[in-house]
Image (cartoon, helix red, strand yellow):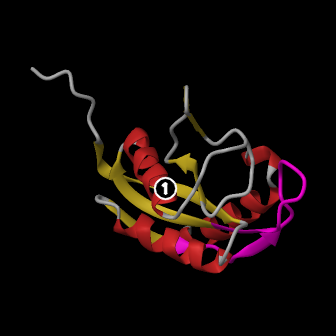
Amino acid sequence: MSDAVPDHVDPPVLAFVALGSNLGDRAAYLANGRAAIGALSGTRLIAASDIEETAPIGPAGQGAYLNQMVAIETTRTPAALLEGLLGIEREQGRLRTARWGARTLDLDIVRFGDLEIAETGLVIPHPELPHRPFWQRELAQLQGVLVP
């Protein structure tokens, strides 16, 4: 018997991932992020919210963010999805130098089905959801499209 932690779930789970960028060609980073999320094994992008420009949260002197949220169906576990998202961030030049600092691409799991997780490095629903009105708008937009 193996003690390996599974990296997939069955059936697929509906999850919501927030994308943000405030460096370089922000729209291109969001587009690259959407494409890379959809290309993750066991993952299918099913809807994307409108793109919204917002003021930065965090250290002063940053440029405005472009933000968007996507709905995905995934057979990845939350930990495996997070690992994939962190890999996409790195591929897009993300450097983690300051908390809430400027970034080429930021990817956050906002919701993962009805799961509630509170582990080091992985909290779902995302703890900042109540404090980010733009995430709430984007999530509502996606839920309006997905729920008849």
Residue 17 place in picture, x, y as percent: 56, 57
Residue 146 colored in magenta in the image = no
Q: Amino acid at mark 1?
A: Arg
Rendered-image quadrant of the C terminus? bottom right
Q: Secondary structure at mark 1?
A: helix
For the point 40% across and 60% down, the residue is 73
Residue 7, image quadrant: top left
Residue 102 place in picture, x, y as percent: 73, 57
| Residue denoted by label 1 | 90
Q: Is residue 145 above or below residue 55?
A: below
Residue 25 vs residue 68, the one in the foreground: 25
For the point 63% across and 73% down, the residue is 49
Residue 61 visible in the snapshot:
yes
Drawn side of residue 11 relative to residue 89, left or right: left
Residue 64 colored in magenta in the image = yes
For the point 76% across and 73% down, the residue is 52
Residue 101 place in picture, x, y as percent: 74, 50
